[in-house]
Amino acid sequence: MEFLKKIYGVARERPKRVVFPEAYEPRIAEAMARLGAEGICEPLVLGDVTEAQVQALVMARGMKEVMARRLLAKPLYRAAAMVAAGEADAMVAGADSPTRRVIEAAAMAIGPAEGVTLPSSFFVMLFPDGREMIFADCALNLEPSAEELADIARASHASAKALLGHSEVAMLSFSTGTSGAGESVERVRAAAELAGFVGPVQGDAALNPKVATKKGMGAGNANVLIFPSLDAGNIAYKLAQELAGAQALGPILQGFAKPVGDLSRGATVEDIVAVSAIVVALA
């Protein structure tokens, strides 16, 4: 697909060091070989614990040295500390680890991006008609508050600009503008005000200029859809896959100070290569 060609090209133009704490896993090992051979990134395996890694945890995260060394015995934490210490530019994990463990390690060692308090995730959705979109959050946060939804929207806006070249964010609800009421729509309304994006808006008004004009909300040209809950986001991206033939790349974690890729434990070698290239493009 055109998106992947573009992302691979971007990655080759600015090669980054990506650490893979699960390099022992056969799919990861094969993907690392491809990534290196094709010049998409410089894949790194875990090295020994260094003083820089220890200090990254002690100084940046306020941790006692004995606790830092204990955590660095764990591969995910050591990989994240390598990124925090500047020994790697990004990390990719999850083929043999639960998402929550990847997030815990990244949160502890790398920490949040400036202005963001909540890690979140997104999928790059590639549609047969050529549309490229970002859906968030479809994999991580169950029932985000208004403040958390605003965080997700800001992080997704930055991700879209980096990956798609532009960002038009719509914060989705069952109601557009002031036409409806209820706890969830009020939460989306508050989040939209905090983040400065269009919302609350229904899916058709977010995507169809004629409907948007009729309902008087936004331009109907969104390429970033922010869902009000994990239920809504997860259902939507899977329906897009099954009914519209969309390809879903991810989930990609966002909101951290440095890029982190989270793999599905069922990820193929091709998936791992694609997620790694996206992570490099975000680095």
Image (cartoon, rainbow, N blue to C red):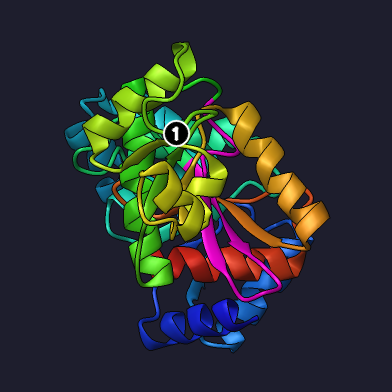
Question: Toward which corner of the image does residue 55 lie, by quadrant?
Answer: top left
Give x and y (percent) for residue 50: 33, 50
Q: In the depicted view, which residue is nearer to us: 45 or 210?
A: 210
- Is residue 227 found inside the magenta-colored segment of the image? no
Q: In the rendered view, tell whether residue 235 sits above or below residue 159.
A: above
The residue carrying mark 1 is: 176
Identify the residue at image location x=35%, y=82%. 14
Give x and y (percent) for residue 134: 51, 55
Identify the residue at image location x=55%, y=27%. 229
- Is residue 125 found inside the magenta-colored segment of the image? yes
Question: Which region of the structure is painted magenta?
Answer: 121-141
Q: What secondary structure is found at the residue carrying circle 1?
A: loop
Give x and y (percent) for residue 279: 46, 63
Q: Which amino acid type is marked by label 1?
A: Thr
- The quadrant of the rendering that contains the N terminus is bottom right
Q: In the depicted view, which residue is nearer to us: 175 or 112?
A: 175
Q: In the rendered view, tell whether residue 155 sits above or below residue 40.
A: above
Question: Toward which corner of the image does residue 164 lie, by quadrant?
Answer: bottom left
Q: In the drawing, does residue 222 fall left or right of residue 84? A: right
Give x and y (percent) for residue 182: 47, 12
Q: In the depicted view, which residue is nearer to us: 67 or 11?
A: 11
Q: In the drawing, does residue 190 fall left or right of residue 47? A: left
